[in-house]
Amino acid sequence: MRIVLLGPPGAGKGTQAQIIAGELGVPAISTGDIFRANVSGQTDLGLKAKVYMDAGDLVPDEITVAMVKDRLAEPDSKAGYLLDGFPRTIAQGEQLRGSLEQLGQRLDRVVELVVEEEELVRRLSGRRMLVGGEWVQRDDDKPETVRRRLEVYREQTAPLSGFYEREGLLSRIDAIGTIEEVTARVMTALGQPGRSDDS
Ligand code: AMP
């Protein structure tokens, strides 16, 4: 299956992407994770991306699209994938559609995780990640950057919801609840009900 997970920062995309991809046996491909790995590794790509990430802005489409194309050309993407954090602009959505068309492929489903903005701010300001045994705040989870990221989401990414709705691919999911509850809703939207709670 080829799936896109849409949703604002703090909606739980990363967590759900890992679980759902595991259930479906496809790789979870997170552009944010790939950028962060490049930032830590101080690669050319990482140095370019960091400036935008630290400001809460999107990395330019041409850099991001080239990186995703490379990733989707890896052998493990053949049988499908779950994209987390891509596409993030209509231009990226169009590029993805074009690349898939060239391969005679299409997306199976786009799932949007819906959470109201007040809750997102609350979640992001409290979010910590484990780095080298220590819980640290992501640079772009600082309050002023969080505000910018939410604004960028509203302006540049939210229009993808209509883009995929017009293609008949979109399922909107209420992403308030426990991780298990949200996973179950997503699996149902993917036509795989019961897959996540049959263990
Ligand atoms: P995320 O982990 O998905 O919240 O992404 C963290 C940051 O990486 C974003 O705020 C952007 O600066 C950058 N980023 C991730 N995915 C994309 C994308 N598809 N297009 C542009 N920038 C991205």
Image (tube, rainbow, N blue to C red):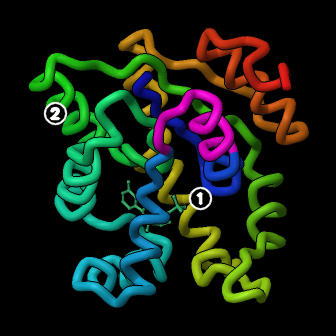
Q: How many numbered marks, from 0 up?
A: 2
Residue 23 in magenta stretch? yes
Question: Which percent across, then down, holds residue 110?
Answer: 49, 25
Q: Residue furthest left?
A: 102
Residue 44 vs 87, above or below: the answer is below
Give the residue pinned by disc 1. 150
Q: Earlier in the sequence, mark 1 or mark 2?
A: 2
Residue 11 vs 195, above or below: the answer is below
Task: Give the residue at x 33% y 77%.
Answer: 49
**Disc on res. 62:** none
Residue 136 in magenta stretch? no
Task: Give the residue at x 74% y 85%.
Answer: 136
Tag 1: amino acid: Leu
Q: Which range of residues does the magenta coloring cover?
A: 16-27
**Front-most of 22 and 167?**
22
Task: Give the residue at x 44% y 41%.
Answer: 83
Mark 2, Cα crowd under 10 Å, few <14 / some 14-19 / many 20+, is some
Secondary structure found at label 2:
helix
Quarter of the image containing the C terminus? top right
Tag 2: amino acid: Ser
Question: Which percent across, then down, holds residue 105?
Answer: 23, 19
Say whether residue 103 is left or right of residue 23: left
**Front-most of 185 and 170?**
185
Give the residue pinned by disc 2. 99
